[in-house]
Amino acid sequence: MKVVILAGGFGTRISEESHLVPKPMIEIGGRPMIWHIMKEYSYYGYHDFIICCGYKQHVIKEWFADYYLYNSDVTFDFTDGSSMEVHNNVAEPWKVTLVDTGLYTMTGGRIKRIQPYVQGETFMLTYGDGVSDVNIKELEAFHKEHGKLATVTAVNVGQRFGVLDIEQDSRISSFREKDDSDGGMINGGYMVLDQGVFDYIDGDKTVFEKEPLKRLAGDGELIAYKHPGFWKCMDTQRDRQQLEDLILSNSAPWMRWVSEK
């Protein structure tokens, strides 16, 4: 199953960093946020990625193009015409497709643009600025069991995002903008989507978290996988520092590929 990562936004809330690189390329623990997300999925056996690029997409493309250089010991020999020898070839089992989804395209439009790359299959979707210890294999099984067009991972944190009204059978009855009095669960990304979701997206100006998810909820086609564990979005410098501190203290819950070695 392919994993789609939204990585094209401007990241204005963390502009101290994002004026230089796209938000998913901001580093925590010496690695870009998007690397951490991909390692999460890869831990569970998902190795085929489609990255929706936009703002400063060249930074993302250059980083992947030079992945060996960033992660291996290299000798450059200029005496014989500048040859290069990679000593410890650090490779990931990844296939990565980088797609230009437009500079000003909204989230729904970015998803619509990668439709040809998912080839009629069910696919994963998440945001390029959040990490979690959600069990992705269990998430996929939950989606298949319930047979809805869309599953979102519901997490309970401070209210900055759209709120989910969840029924007892895990069906989402409505998807709405947050309210100051809300204490409900929110959309934490880590979604599983069937092809029918594309019918709910009009074009580049469509914000996926607004009309499409609201319509899916109204049609009974949106369901919540409730995750009580760790989830953190890197929305501000404070968020970034909190994630950095977890890594430095060897207590980052999402880094299972390290903690379970």
Image (spheres, grey):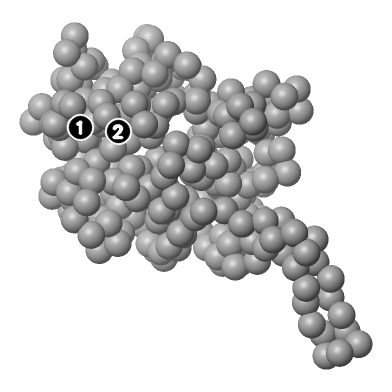
Amino acid type, label 1: Lys
Q: Residue furthest right?
A: 79
Q: Relative to the observer, which residue lies in front, 156 or 162?
A: 156
In space, the residues marked 2 and 1 are separated at their CA atoms by 6 Å
Q: Pinpoint residue 150: horizontal percent, then vertical percent.
A: 21, 35
Q: Is residue 260 above or below residue 33?
A: above
At mark 2, the secondary structure is: helix
Question: Looking at the image, can residue 25 be seen?
Answer: yes
Q: Which mark is residue 140?
A: 2
Q: Based on the displayed image, in which of its 4 quarters is residue 163 positioned?
A: top left
* Labelled pair 2, 1 in contact (Cβ < 8 Å): yes
* Label 2 environment density (alpha carbons within 10 Å; few <14, some 14–19, many ≥20): many
From this viewpoint, is residue 238 visible? no
The quadrant holding residue 193 is top left
Tell me: residue 60, above or below residue 189: below
Which structural element holds mark 1? helix
Classify residue 204 as left or right of residue 17: left
Q: Identify the residue under disc 1.
A: 144
**Who's the residue at 57% across and 53% down the image?**
92
Q: Seen from this angle, which residue lies furthest left?
A: 219
Quick check: 211 left or right of 135? left
